[in-house]
Image: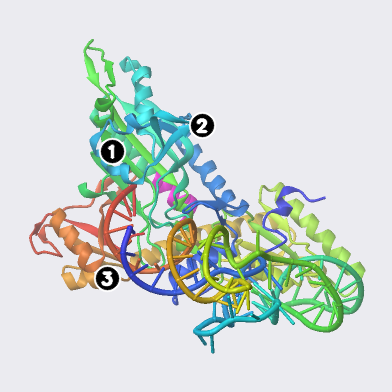
Amino acid sequence: MLDSADQIGQERTTNDGPIIPRATDFAQWYQDIIAAAELVDQAPVRGCYILRPNGYFIWESIQRDLDARFKQHGVQNAYFPLLIPMSFIMKEAEHVEGFAPELAVVTHGGGEALEEPLVVRPTSETVIWSTFRKWIRSHRDLPLLLNQWCNVMRWEKRPRAFLRTAEFLWQEGHTAHATAEEARQYALENHVIYYDFLEECLGIGPIAGEKPPHERFPGAVATFTLEPMMQDGRALQTGTSHDLGDTFGRAFDVTYQGEDGQSHPVFATSWGMSTRTIGGVLMVHGDDRGAVFPPTVAPVQVAIVPVPGRDDASTRAVETAATDLKQTLTKAGLRVTVDSRPGMRPGAKFFHWERRGTPLRLEIGPRDIEAGQVMAARRDTGEKMAVPLSGIATAVQSTLDAIQMNLRMQAHARREARTYTVDTRAGIAETVLKGYAFTRWCESRECAADMQAQSRGTIRCFPFEKHGNEFRPIPNDPGPCGWCGNHATRRVLVGRSY
RNA sequence: CGGGGAGUAGCUCAGCCCGGUAGAGCGCCACGUUUGGGACGUGGAAGUCGGAGGUUCAAGUCCUCUCUCCCCGACCA
């Protein structure tokens, strides 16, 4: 009898088409590895994607890890409705302007035209703050720290699997605070949570920083962003934390009574991380053989491939050994599957598990049983080595740890190697094609627009550096703007983005 | 939303210019031989040609509209 772990990734029909190398066509490669790993399928509606079991598992892994981190900071989960009255969205001017073009609107229900159209939430600040108005009375009600795991919809003009989809899954955190300072501090605190998560769980090595004003979330007074570098040198904004000031508190007339007996405005943060992050994992870790998943999120961490013997007896012995091995590793808390599909040669199975990014493959055949070992093949390095069966669980666990660490280090090294300090127009234009440009910027919006028009590079952020458990802006470095030559006080990160 | 490319079997595609019986490879199913890096033989199943309308004795092929996917850009996070 098969248990669920045995069925993961062993669909009866598979995609084993070719994978275009990254260097040949990065966009095509991205689609190829998504197909190879069977992460999504096409949906009948434009821009919407079906998350297949493998793709959804990655998301569940992300949820599990991230949710625990939020809860350690005292955040509680809640759930607000999918549909929001149109008038709510209209209450905050910048917010409307930012989201109006990408709203999906429900105009009919129960066979009749609705009196007021409902929007499918693009984000939930408005409905949440309309509710906070009822929940917040006293300074004793603050801070209020909520999060919800849900779907949102933004009518995207140019969809791409995971990176930009009309409907996507995410978490959105919403907090309310008594002072502007507290709200700012919480936004930064969450920025650190995201950063640590991307490093420790996904190993995708982001640059942390603050967005320039023209790149802020509609309605925010500050937006903090994480910008990991993909293997083609482009940036993927992943996980933003917003200091919303009292924008939404004012728009929804939320106040609290302080210890002084007076009425005070309420300050807000919001922060979100979405299924887009999965696209980041793929584009940071994948290689020309297929997807490569860090052990933390891989649907299957260890794939055991039995190699049949020359006769029935030895083949049965191999099967038994494979099952025992699986049991040992499962007991140690690992996600393990035995690929016992009949009529398929071992080589085809190796190929299969490689394409879908399984971190470690264990081969066990008659020769191994005789030697009391298995052959282990690492997905990240391709390295193949014999591992004794005694103490196998410990050895496998430490190999998985090594893979996790290696992926993280590789991503880090790649980003460092492709970040260039430049001080000229030509330097920016040139480096932005292969990675990040670290350059001075005058902080004029017109200059940024010109830079984008001429070089396709955008201001990703004012970078931070980490001191212990908090971020601080990097030191100022006054000089001429790398693009227009006007005075600049500090350096920014410039890159092409997804 | 502007520009370009494409939708034919599960996948990759040929057939369209020049209308006349729906094709190939891989995959899938059955049986057998195989099995340490994508196995082979024999037999078999499988497509209202993205959808709607039109022209025609006859449309995968010609015309019109439409939907979807991919790429480059604009917008956005």
Which numbered disc, 1 or 3, marks the residue that appears first in the sequence? Answer: 1
Q: Could you tell me which secondary element the residue under label 1 belongs to?
A: helix
Give, as a single range, the part of the protein colored magenta.
A194-203
Provide the chain ID for the residue under circle 3: A
The 10 Å Cα crowd at callout 3, few under 14, some 14 to 19, many 20 or more, is: many
Residue type for callout 1: Val
Provide the chain ID for the residue under circle 2: A
Q: Quadrant of residue A268?
A: top left
For mark 3, what is the residue? A431
Q: Residue at x 37, y 61 (%)?
A: A229
Q: Is residue A184 inside the magenta stretch?
A: no
For mark 1, what is the residue? A96
Image location (x, y in percent) of residue A383: 60, 71
Residue type for callout 2: Gly
Image location (x, y in percent) of residue B4: 38, 73
A97 and A413: which is toward the camera: A97
**Image mark for residue A111:** 2
Q: Main secondary structure of the magenta part?
A: helix
Q: Could you tell me which secondary element the residue under label 2 belongs to?
A: loop
Mark 2 or mark 3, which is nearer to you? Answer: 2
Which numbered disc, 2 or 1, marks the residue that appears first in the sequence? Answer: 1
The 10 Å Cα crowd at callout 2, few under 14, some 14 to 19, many 20 or more, is: few
**Image mark for residue A30:** none
Check the image and report above or below for A490 versus A116: below
A33 and A184: which is toward the camera: A33
- Quadrant that contains the C terminus of chain A: bottom left
